[in-house]
Image (cartoon, helix red, strand yellow):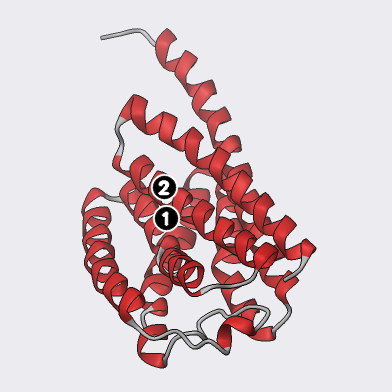
Amino acid sequence: MSPEGAAMSLASAAISAVFAFLVLHQWLARRKAYQLAWTVGLFMFTLAAFMQFIAEAYGWTEPVYRVYYFLAAPLVAVLGVGSAFLANRRLGMALSLYTIVLAVGFAWVVFTATVSPAALLEPIPAGNGFSSSVRIWSPLFTVPGSLALIGIALISYWRTRFTFNLWIAAGAIVAAGSGALASLDVPWLLYLGELVGIALLFGGFLASREPAKALRPAAAQAPSS
């Protein structure tokens, strides 16, 4: 437990919550599949970060750890689904089906597996609270999700030269890689990585709204045929 870890986790949860509600507002107005996927993924990030805050403030417990692990492992894949829908609807459908089916099995494994009490006493339990049969599921989410999230952002930048795509790619790299920092047993590195990652993603999202605002008046003034 540490006040620094609690503060950074709470800050990450707050940024992600604002981000999630803004994307939810967009989805309610436009009903696009990528907006729904990003909304779900961002709320997962919010809740996972809040579980970290609870753990850093009051200590890890088995229920908090199970909920945290279930949310943290798949969230990059869910965000990747949103990016996939932006690039290609069929790709988005394929990745979403893959993620949903995998998440159902993952939920059963996480909530029925035995949690190591000793691991909950560590500064960051990470995946150590579960056996390798549970931990093996994490890369099944993280690898395809990261490839979609980062790859599509970079391809979009190459095509459009909109710099907000670089913000999104950088945020995704930091957020996806922050979990690896847990293995260094330095808690503040993990929490700082998550905070920087979600801040970069949020900054990219806010910057992406400016080109859209600029294009809408131009479209409205264009002569109709």
Cβ atoms under marks 1 and 2 closer than 8 Å: yes
Secondary structure beneath dot 2 equals helix
Task: Give percent across and percent down for residue 24.
Answer: 42, 35
- With 186 as the anchor, is 31 left or right in this view? left
- Location of residue 23 by image quarter: top left
Residue 122, picture quadrant = bottom right
- Residue 85, given in percent of the width and then of the height, sits at 31, 49
Where is 182 relative to 55, above or below? below
Vertically, is 94 above or below 190? above
- Mark 1 and mark 2: Cα distance apart in space: 5 Å
- Residue at x 44% of width, y 65% of height: 67
Q: Answer whether residue 122 is visible to the viewer in this image.
A: yes
User: Looking at the figure, which quarter contains the N terminus?
Assistant: bottom right
Neighbor class of circle 1 (other Cα within 10 Å; few <14, some 14-19, many 20+) is: many
Disc 1 is placed on an element classified as helix
Q: Is residue 163 visible in the rendered structure shown here? A: no
- The residue that label 1 is drawn on is 79
Relative side of 99 to 209, left or right? left
Q: Give residue 71's position: percent from left, percent from top.
A: 43, 63
Residue type (three-letter) at the residue carrying disc 2: Trp
* Amino acid type at mark 1: Leu
Query: Which of the image's four quarters has the C terminus?
Result: top left
Q: Is residue 31 left or right of residue 44?
A: left
The residue under label 2 is 38
Closer to the chain start, of discs 1 and 2, is 2
